[in-house]
């Protein structure tokens, strides 16, 4: 059976805290995202508990009458619980060493395993077309799991929002980027 899992990075947000909401532009992007999926049959919507992720798919939920399921395993990866002024360099290092871990944070491998478990559960479920909304770093680690060329530079090139699809057929997963940022830049 063929299944599609749409991995969505949240729309533009006001900050990084769990309670950070979308910007004005982010709310416009969320409406556009709903239109983007308007011709796609969706069975389930699963979101990170972070407000910006939920707000990104609320228009889709309202349009389809599908309740948003919250899964804390889709929360953004914690790189460290201490302030890292050079966090970009530290993040880059974690793409090169998946076991590297900073104080209070989780390694890339730990974060990857967390989101892969969600994806595996979705592929084993009855749902044929599911949307998962998460965050840039966690999304990148999921994509790296299926394509080992997805690296730090690929993470840097993600947009808010962004959409990839994972197609699962005969125990094989293929991925493709669907989002084109220039479509909503005006």
Image (spheres, rainbow, N blue to C red):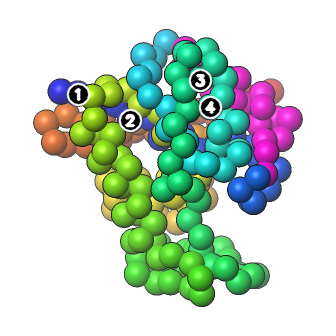
Whether the residues at callouts 2 and 3 have beta carbons within 8 Å, the answer is: no
Q: Is residue 85 visible?
A: yes
For marks 2 and 3, give the one nearer the viewer: 3
User: Which image quarter: residue 41?
Assistant: top left
Image marks 4 and 3: residues in contact by CB distance under 8 Å? yes
Q: Mark 4 points at which residue?
A: 57
Q: Nearer the viewer, residue 121 or 108?
A: 121
Q: Residues within 10 Å of mark 1 (few under 14, many from 20)?
A: few
Q: Name the residue under label 1.
A: 2
Mark 4 or mark 2: whose residue is earlier in sequence = 2
Residue depicted at x 38% and y 35% = 5
Q: Which mark is residue 5?
A: 2
Q: Distance between the residues labelled 2 and 3?
A: 16 Å
Q: What is the CA distance from the residue labelled 3 to the residue labelled 1? A: 23 Å
Q: How far apart are marks 4 and 2 (CA)?
A: 15 Å
Question: How far apart are the alpha carbons under marks 2 and 1?
Answer: 10 Å
Q: Which mark sits nearer the N-terminus, 1 or 4?
A: 1
Residue occupied by mark 3: 61
Compared to residue 4, the image places residue 19 above or below, namely below
Q: Residue at x 55, y 15 (%)?
A: 64
Q: Is residue 12 above or below residue 179?
A: below
Is residue 28 part of the magenta span, yes or no?
yes
* Residue 181, position as x, y percentages in the image: 65, 35
Q: Where is residue 105 in the image (x, y as percent from the top left)?
A: 56, 78
């Amino acid at each position: 059976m063929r299944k599609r899992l749409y991995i969505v990075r949240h729309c533009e947000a006001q900050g990084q805290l769990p309670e950070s909401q979308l910007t004005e532009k982010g709310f416009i992007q969320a409406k556009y995202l709903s239109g983007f999926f308007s011709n796609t049959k969706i069975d389930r919507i699963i979101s990170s508990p972070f407000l910006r992720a939920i707000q990104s798919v609320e228009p889709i939920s309202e349009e389809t009458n599908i309740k948003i399921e919250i899964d804390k395993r889709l929360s953004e990866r914690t790189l460290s619980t201490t302030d890292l002024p050079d966090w970009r360099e530290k993040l880059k290092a974690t793409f090169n060493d998946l076991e590297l871990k900073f104080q209070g944070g989780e390694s890339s491998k730990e974060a990857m395993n967390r989101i892969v478990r969600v994806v595996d559960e979705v592929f084993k479920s009855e749902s044929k077309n599911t949307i998962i909304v998460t965050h840039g770093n966690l999304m990148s680690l999921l994509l790296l799991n299926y394509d080992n060329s997805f690296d730090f530079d690929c993470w840097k090139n993600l947009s808010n929002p962004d959409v990839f699809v994972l197609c699962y057929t005969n125990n094989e997963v293929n991925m493709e980027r669907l989002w084109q940022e220039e479509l909503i830049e005006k």
